[in-house]
Amino acid sequence: MTVLRSADAPEGVALLQLARPEARNALDLTTRRALAEHLEAIAADPQIRATVVTGDRTAFAAGADLNLIARASPMEIHRLDLHALWRRVGEHPKPLVAAVNGPAYGAGFELALMCDLIVAGPASRFALPEIKVGIMPGAGGSQRLVRAVGKHRALRLLLSGDPIDGATAERWGLVSHLADSDACVLQTALGVAEAVAARPPLAAQMIKEAVLEGADLPLDAALAIERKSNQLLFDTADQKECMAAFLEKRSPVVRGA
């Protein structure tokens, strides 16, 4: 299951930990539902401004639980409605930070790709091995990966099913932060999330929305989204406070309004 450990996180940050160590945090139906439910609650909580999703020291998530799908028919896969659960992750409005130790394989990699920032350790591994069991990614892996690293690198991973390490993932632009050691991945991710949470949250949400919505649009349409979002933020109290603080050479008091 997924456990919420807000007490272990800085102010304004939620920590979601995948907790199936006996299965290297493979994503079963219970875990997927719990993750979606926690994120739905976080979206409605004004006190939480960013979230870290992690596994443990040995694995982020080793993929889907094949016991769930190995013998399923197409209609049984359809009835699981996994897409609806993933959509609640991919459309989460607040910043998400993945803290990756060890393998992020298959559905685990797809979960990391749904996050806005990825903090990884030197021993982390990223792979989409679905081709090795006769299928392909089904939660956005092929589509998000090609948008992140380009066609040829994406197909290298998709067609081989083989992993790359954290240093390679950072060099490709897939990982936003490479931690100094595997032992400090979570603390690094919490620090990144804390810094994001200290920023005006309405601005953070609009930035995320503009990036995600505009990424696949023609430039003119994407620029229109950016322009309108920028203009709307001038109606927020945080904009007035932060600009006043800048001019007055003091630290702003961000209120999320």
Image (cartoon, rainbow, N blue to C red):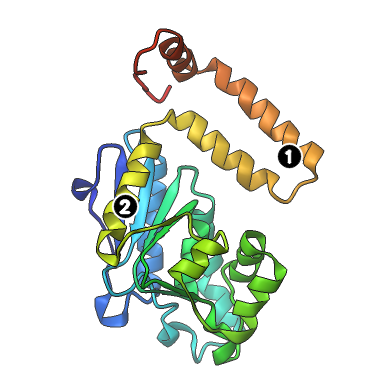
| 12 is higher (above) or lower (below) than 249 | below
Give percent across and percent down for residue 179. 35, 58
| Kind of residue sitting beneath label 2 | Thr
| 145 is higher (above) or lower (below) than 28 | above
Give percent across and percent down for residue 192. 37, 45
Q: Which residue is at the front of the view, 28 or 50?
A: 50
Please, what secondary structure does the residue beneath circle 2 have?
Answer: helix
**In this rendering, position of residue 217 left or right of residue 10:** right
The N terminus - image quarter: bottom left
Residue sitting at 43 percent across and 83 percent down?
68
| 68 is higher (above) or lower (below) than 150 | below
Which class describes the residues within 10 Å of circle 1: few (<14), some (14-19), or many (20+)? some
| Kind of residue sitting beneath label 1 | Ala
Q: Residue 73 appears in which quarter of the rendering?
A: bottom right
Q: Which residue is at the front of the view, 4 or 119?
A: 119
Q: Which mark is residue 188?
A: 2
For disc 1, the marked residue is 222
Q: Residue 65 appears in which quarter of the rendering?
A: bottom left
Residue sitting at 39 percent across and 64 percent down?
33
**In this rendering, position of residue 1 left or right of residue 157:** left
Which is nearer the N-term, disc 2 or disc 1?
Answer: 2
Which class describes the residues within 10 Å of circle 2: few (<14), some (14-19), or many (20+)? many
* Contact between labelled residues 1 and 2, with CB atoms less than 8 Å apart: no
